[in-house]
Image (tube, rainbow, N blue to C red):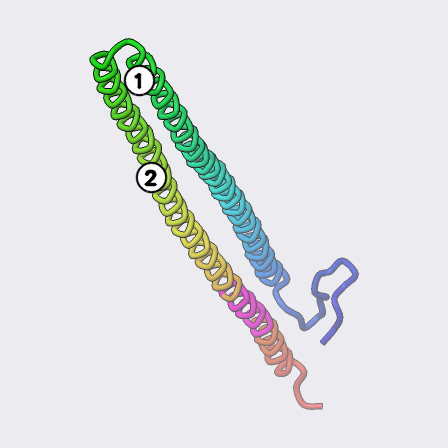
Amino acid sequence: MDDLAPNGKLPTAFHGYSRDAVDSLLGKIEDSYRAVIAERDELRGNLADTSRRLDGVTAELEDRKRKERAIADAVIEAERLKADGEKQAGAIKGEAAGEAAETRRRANQAAQELRTTAERDAERIRRDAELEAEAIKHDAEAARDRAASESDELLRGAQSRADRLIGEMRQSLEQRQHQAEELLDDVGVRLGSLVRDLFDQIGSASHEQDAAVEPEQGPG
Protein backbone atom coordinates (compact mmCIF):
# COMPACT_ATOMS: atom_id res chain seq x y z
CA MET A 1 0.00 0.00 0.00
CA ASP A 2 1.30 3.47 -0.90
CA ASP A 3 2.10 5.96 1.85
CA LEU A 4 -0.07 9.03 2.41
CA ALA A 5 0.67 12.17 0.43
CA PRO A 6 2.46 15.06 2.26
CA ASN A 7 -0.87 16.87 2.70
CA GLY A 8 -2.28 13.92 4.71
CA LYS A 9 -4.66 12.68 1.96
CA LEU A 10 -4.61 9.32 0.19
CA PRO A 11 -2.50 9.35 -3.02
CA THR A 12 -4.26 8.90 -6.34
CA ALA A 13 -3.23 6.57 -9.16
CA PHE A 14 -4.36 5.77 -12.65
CA HIS A 15 -6.18 2.63 -11.53
CA GLY A 16 -7.31 4.25 -8.25
CA TYR A 17 -10.51 5.06 -6.44
CA SER A 18 -13.25 7.68 -6.41
CA ARG A 19 -11.47 10.49 -4.63
CA ASP A 20 -14.71 12.37 -3.77
CA ALA A 21 -16.25 9.27 -2.16
CA VAL A 22 -13.20 8.58 -0.02
CA ASP A 23 -12.88 12.24 1.00
CA SER A 24 -16.55 12.23 2.01
CA LEU A 25 -16.02 9.09 4.10
CA LEU A 26 -12.96 10.60 5.79
CA GLY A 27 -15.01 13.72 6.55
CA LYS A 28 -17.63 11.58 8.25
CA ILE A 29 -14.92 9.92 10.34
CA GLU A 30 -13.58 13.33 11.35
CA ASP A 31 -17.09 14.54 12.28
CA SER A 32 -17.64 11.42 14.42
CA TYR A 33 -14.32 11.96 16.18
CA ARG A 34 -15.18 15.61 16.92
CA ALA A 35 -18.57 14.52 18.29
CA VAL A 36 -16.84 12.05 20.62
CA ILE A 37 -14.47 14.80 21.84
CA ALA A 38 -17.46 17.09 22.52
CA GLU A 39 -19.26 14.35 24.49
CA ARG A 40 -16.08 13.69 26.48
CA ASP A 41 -15.78 17.41 27.36
CA GLU A 42 -19.44 17.47 28.44
CA LEU A 43 -18.87 14.46 30.71
CA ARG A 44 -15.88 16.20 32.26
CA GLY A 45 -18.04 19.25 32.96
CA ASN A 46 -20.69 17.07 34.60
CA LEU A 47 -18.06 15.40 36.77
CA ALA A 48 -16.74 18.82 37.84
CA ASP A 49 -20.27 19.91 38.78
CA THR A 50 -20.75 16.75 40.83
CA SER A 51 -17.46 17.45 42.62
CA ARG A 52 -18.70 20.94 43.52
CA ARG A 53 -21.92 19.46 44.90
CA LEU A 54 -19.88 17.09 47.09
CA ASP A 55 -17.96 20.09 48.38
CA GLY A 56 -21.31 21.67 49.31
CA VAL A 57 -22.30 18.53 51.23
CA THR A 58 -18.96 18.64 53.08
CA ALA A 59 -19.58 22.29 54.03
CA GLU A 60 -23.05 21.37 55.32
CA LEU A 61 -21.56 18.62 57.49
CA GLU A 62 -19.04 21.09 58.91
CA ASP A 63 -21.92 23.44 59.78
CA ARG A 64 -23.69 20.55 61.52
CA LYS A 65 -20.57 19.86 63.55
CA ARG A 66 -20.40 23.49 64.64
CA LYS A 67 -24.02 23.30 65.79
CA GLU A 68 -23.28 20.10 67.69
CA ARG A 69 -20.37 21.79 69.44
CA ALA A 70 -22.71 24.65 70.39
CA ILE A 71 -25.15 22.13 71.88
CA ALA A 72 -22.30 20.49 73.81
CA ASP A 73 -21.37 23.91 75.18
CA ALA A 74 -25.00 24.36 76.25
CA VAL A 75 -24.84 21.04 78.13
CA ILE A 76 -21.68 22.19 79.91
CA GLU A 77 -23.40 25.47 80.81
CA ALA A 78 -26.34 23.51 82.21
CA GLU A 79 -23.96 21.51 84.39
CA ARG A 80 -22.40 24.74 85.63
CA LEU A 81 -25.84 26.15 86.44
CA LYS A 82 -26.62 22.98 88.36
CA ALA A 83 -23.42 23.33 90.40
CA ASP A 84 -24.18 27.01 91.06
CA GLY A 85 -27.71 26.09 92.12
CA GLU A 86 -26.45 23.50 94.56
CA LYS A 87 -23.94 26.00 95.92
CA GLN A 88 -26.66 28.64 96.35
CA ALA A 89 -28.89 26.08 98.02
CA GLY A 90 -26.13 25.30 100.49
CA ALA A 91 -25.63 29.00 101.17
CA ILE A 92 -29.35 29.46 101.67
CA LYS A 93 -29.46 26.54 104.08
CA GLY A 94 -26.50 27.98 105.96
CA GLU A 95 -28.14 31.37 106.13
CA ALA A 96 -31.37 29.79 107.26
CA ALA A 97 -29.58 27.87 110.00
CA GLY A 98 -27.82 31.04 111.13
CA GLU A 99 -31.06 32.96 111.16
CA ALA A 100 -32.72 30.19 113.14
CA ALA A 101 -29.90 30.20 115.69
CA GLU A 102 -30.12 33.96 116.00
CA THR A 103 -33.86 33.78 116.42
CA ARG A 104 -33.53 31.12 119.08
CA ARG A 105 -30.96 33.21 120.91
CA ARG A 106 -33.24 36.22 120.89
CA ALA A 107 -36.20 34.07 121.85
CA ASN A 108 -34.33 32.66 124.82
CA GLN A 109 -33.51 36.17 125.89
CA ALA A 110 -37.04 37.46 125.42
CA ALA A 111 -39.26 34.64 126.48
CA GLN A 112 -40.20 31.02 126.03
CA GLU A 113 -43.15 31.95 123.85
CA LEU A 114 -41.02 33.97 121.50
CA ARG A 115 -38.49 31.12 121.32
CA THR A 116 -41.23 28.70 120.25
CA THR A 117 -42.42 31.10 117.55
CA ALA A 118 -38.86 31.60 116.28
CA GLU A 119 -38.29 27.86 116.03
CA ARG A 120 -41.47 27.47 113.92
CA ASP A 121 -40.29 30.24 111.66
CA ALA A 122 -36.85 28.65 111.33
CA GLU A 123 -38.37 25.28 110.40
CA ARG A 124 -40.56 26.90 107.75
CA ILE A 125 -37.61 28.74 106.26
CA ARG A 126 -35.56 25.54 106.18
CA ARG A 127 -38.29 23.64 104.36
CA ASP A 128 -38.70 26.44 101.83
CA ALA A 129 -34.96 26.52 101.23
CA GLU A 130 -34.83 22.77 100.64
CA LEU A 131 -37.77 22.93 98.24
CA GLU A 132 -36.15 25.76 96.34
CA ALA A 133 -32.85 23.87 96.16
CA GLU A 134 -34.62 20.76 94.85
CA ALA A 135 -36.46 22.83 92.24
CA ILE A 136 -33.23 24.42 91.02
CA LYS A 137 -31.55 21.01 90.85
CA HIS A 138 -34.49 19.52 88.95
CA ASP A 139 -34.55 22.37 86.43
CA ALA A 140 -30.82 22.05 85.78
CA GLU A 141 -31.09 18.27 85.24
CA ALA A 142 -34.08 18.71 82.91
CA ALA A 143 -32.17 21.31 80.85
CA ARG A 144 -29.16 18.99 80.62
CA ASP A 145 -31.33 16.03 79.52
CA ARG A 146 -33.11 18.09 76.86
CA ALA A 147 -29.85 19.40 75.47
CA ALA A 148 -28.34 15.90 75.32
CA SER A 149 -31.44 14.48 73.60
CA GLU A 150 -31.53 17.25 71.01
CA SER A 151 -27.82 16.82 70.31
CA ASP A 152 -28.19 13.07 69.72
CA GLU A 153 -31.19 13.60 67.44
CA LEU A 154 -29.40 16.26 65.37
CA LEU A 155 -26.32 14.06 65.04
CA ARG A 156 -28.31 11.03 63.88
CA GLY A 157 -30.28 13.10 61.39
CA ALA A 158 -27.16 14.77 59.98
CA GLN A 159 -25.31 11.47 59.66
CA SER A 160 -28.27 9.81 57.92
CA ARG A 161 -28.67 12.65 55.42
CA ALA A 162 -24.93 12.77 54.77
CA ASP A 163 -24.77 9.00 54.14
CA ARG A 164 -27.75 9.20 51.79
CA LEU A 165 -26.35 12.15 49.81
CA ILE A 166 -22.89 10.62 49.48
CA GLY A 167 -24.41 7.30 48.37
CA GLU A 168 -26.49 9.07 45.70
CA MET A 169 -23.46 11.01 44.48
CA ARG A 170 -21.35 7.87 44.22
CA GLN A 171 -24.10 6.00 42.37
CA SER A 172 -24.52 8.90 39.93
CA LEU A 173 -20.76 9.05 39.29
CA GLU A 174 -20.61 5.30 38.65
CA GLN A 175 -23.53 5.50 36.22
CA ARG A 176 -21.94 8.41 34.33
CA GLN A 177 -18.59 6.61 34.16
CA HIS A 178 -20.29 3.46 32.86
CA GLN A 179 -22.17 5.49 30.23
CA ALA A 180 -18.95 7.19 29.14
CA GLU A 181 -17.18 3.83 28.78
CA GLU A 182 -20.07 2.42 26.76
CA LEU A 183 -20.08 5.51 24.55
CA LEU A 184 -16.31 5.28 23.91
CA ASP A 185 -16.62 1.55 23.11
CA ASP A 186 -19.46 2.24 20.68
CA VAL A 187 -17.48 5.01 19.01
CA GLY A 188 -14.46 2.73 18.66
CA VAL A 189 -16.64 0.07 17.00
CA ARG A 190 -18.16 2.65 14.63
CA LEU A 191 -14.74 4.06 13.69
CA GLY A 192 -13.39 0.57 13.04
CA SER A 193 -16.41 -0.22 10.86
CA LEU A 194 -16.00 3.01 8.89
CA VAL A 195 -12.30 2.32 8.28
CA ARG A 196 -13.05 -1.24 7.12
CA ASP A 197 -15.74 0.07 4.76
CA LEU A 198 -13.26 2.60 3.40
CA PHE A 199 -10.65 -0.05 2.58
CA ASP A 200 -13.35 -2.35 1.16
CA GLN A 201 -14.55 0.42 -1.16
CA ILE A 202 -10.97 1.21 -2.22
CA GLY A 203 -10.26 -2.46 -2.95
CA SER A 204 -13.55 -2.87 -4.84
CA ALA A 205 -12.84 0.20 -6.94
CA SER A 206 -9.34 -1.09 -7.80
CA HIS A 207 -10.72 -4.50 -8.90
CA GLU A 208 -13.36 -2.85 -11.06
CA GLN A 209 -10.76 -0.66 -12.76
CA ASP A 210 -8.47 -3.68 -13.40
CA ALA A 211 -11.37 -5.69 -14.83
CA ALA A 212 -12.32 -2.85 -17.14
CA VAL A 213 -8.75 -2.42 -18.47
CA GLU A 214 -7.86 -6.12 -19.09
CA PRO A 215 -10.28 -6.70 -22.10
CA GLU A 216 -8.93 -3.60 -23.80
CA GLN A 217 -5.34 -4.94 -23.78
CA GLY A 218 -6.19 -8.14 -25.74
CA PRO A 219 -3.77 -11.04 -26.40
CA GLY A 220 -0.05 -10.25 -26.42
Residue found at x 39% / y 32%: 82
Compare residues 217 and 96 and report the one nearer the observer: 96
Q: Nearer the viewer, residue 61 or 46?
A: 61
Q: Give the range drawn in magenta.
A: 186-200
Q: How crowded is mark 2: few (under 14 residues within 10 Å), some or many (20 or more)?
A: some
Q: Which amino acid does label 1 sit on?
A: Arg
Q: Residue furthest top?
A: 110
Q: Where is residue 117 in the image (x, y as percent from the top left)?
A: 21, 15
Task: Classify mark 1: residues with Cα within 10 Å, few (<14), some (14-19) or many (20+).
Answer: many
Q: Which mark is residue 1?
A: none
Check if residue 190 falls in the magenta segment. yes
Residue holding disc 2: 145
Q: What element carries label 1?
A: helix
Q: Earlier in the sequence, mark 2 or mark 1?
A: 1
Kind of residue at disc 2: Asp
Horizontal side of residue 177 vs 139, given as left or right:
right
Q: In which quarter of the image is the N terminus?
A: bottom right
Q: Nearer the viewer, residue 212 or 17?
A: 17
Residue 115, relative to residue 127: is it above or below?
above
Number of numbered discs visible in the structure rendering: 2
The answer to which image quadrant residue 99 occupies is top left
Magenta segment's dominant SS is helix
Q: Residue 19: horizontal and vertical position, in percent?
A: 64, 62
